[in-house]
Image (cartoon, rainbow, N blue to C red):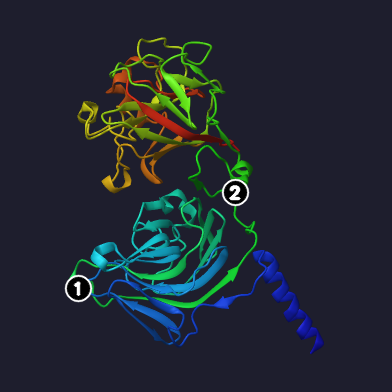
Amino acid sequence: MKKIFLLQALIIFCSYSHSQTTGKWISLFDGKTLNGWKKGAGNAEYKVENGAIIGTTVMPSPNSFLVTEKEFENFVLELEAKIDDTTSNSGIQIRSHLDPSANNGQVKVYGYQYELDPSSRRWTGGIYDEGRRDWLYPLSLNHDAQNAFKLGVYNKIKVECFDNTIKTWINGEPSAMLVDTFDQKGFIGLQVHAISKAEDAGKKVYFKNIRLMSITKPSADFPKSVYVMNNIPNTLTGYEKNQGWRLLFNGVDSKGWKAAYKDNFPEHGWVIKDGILTVLSSEGKEGGVGGDIVTIDQYSTFDLSFDFKLTTGANSGVKYFVKLTEHNEGSAIGLEYQILDDKVHPDAKLGRDGDRTLASLYDLIPAQKQERFVHPIGQWNTGRIIVYPNNHVEHYLNGVKVLEYERGSKAYRDLVAISKYKIWDHFGEAPKGHILLQDHGNEVSFRSIKIREILNH
């Protein structure tokens, strides 16, 4: 008996040490009643059956929520959830709040949400901002976790919130990491998603074994492969630094940058103020006043992330594999992630099939994007370009992959042959090149420009 007792004590000690917690697990659901919970918004039915909270869709109703009466700050949350139908959708609110005056007095829930998504999109474990900013971490940012959710069975869900960082897991698979500053305390909530068709009424989502533990420091068991969506401008977390990320723009000065065809940074046309790098307007003249700027260093395989903000009708671009050997008039030559006001600038209607629109590979491949994932003029968007050692390239916009291609492939060269770049030999196929921010004569701002070089093993 003594040996059994010591073994049990050791197991308990190890489990607490691994989670780096100082408190005790508390059950948020007793398995029998809804004590400690209250209706947050919506008309969906919540009941307890066979040790689970079951939420059922109804018509008509906005998104419905059952929320905890208490609020929580720094914690690990664990529970199990089941969805039986691929057309259903649900989520778990964390650090969330109520707005009693919203929806004509019908109440609105807003705040961070752990996504439960059984559809072909496979975004379970992603982070959504319910009732506020929409998607913060689409799970297209972490392909490895997209197959972890299982339909029709209970899935193990884990969320860790500590200070400004949220981490998620699905069935033990690390899913998302978000660094954000909006909320550091709030309630836990269980969502039944709104439906638009009467035939979808009566569908159920199940929750059980809901428990929470307060923590005083974050866990360390997150692999280096997970991309961090860091919404604090011009900063890198320790986790990002360990991944190999470094800032290309420090938010203070032009260190690491110069004019495309000069030795120094432009004296006019570019401004650095309040942590923002801005190219000023020169009435749409390509080359502008200051001209393009490029990184002093060159890169071959990399993961590049950057925030940008457009003014109305603006045009710019982020170019890569820029060699600076062409000495052409206007902008320097390179593969271009197009930055454009698609609704106003005429370039959006030029080219072929929209290949000059926002986030496209300019004049070669159009970006496949939904309007809801494009932030309005005057708000910040996040672009991302990944170049792998095998020459596979991907463009992302606000966390969603919008195109991919193989640099140097026959398909790629066929596109170059019918583009404006056909006059350049081996266009875009240099082994390495500069990163370029384009001066196209319109005001566009940049911040949080960071890069991680990908080693060719």
Q: Which residue is drawn at 23% across and 64% down?
A: 104
Q: Residue at x 20, y 66 (%)?
A: 196
Mark 2 closeness class: few <14, some 14–19, many ≥20 residues within 10 Å? few
- Residue 109 x/y as whole percent: 36, 64
- Residue 38 x/y as whole percent: 39, 77
- In the image, taking residue 184 as reference, residue 44 lies left or right, namely left
Name above or below for residue 37 compared with residue 243. Answer: below
The answer to whether residue 216 is visible is yes
Residue 235's quadrant in the figure? top right
Contact (CB < 8 A) between labels 2 and 1?
no
Q: Which mark is residue 199?
A: 1
- Residue 26 x/y as whole percent: 57, 77
Q: Residue 224 carries which label?
A: 2
Q: How many marks can you see?
A: 2
Q: Which mark is residue 23?
A: none
Residue projecting furthest to the right = 2
Badge 2 amino acid: Lys
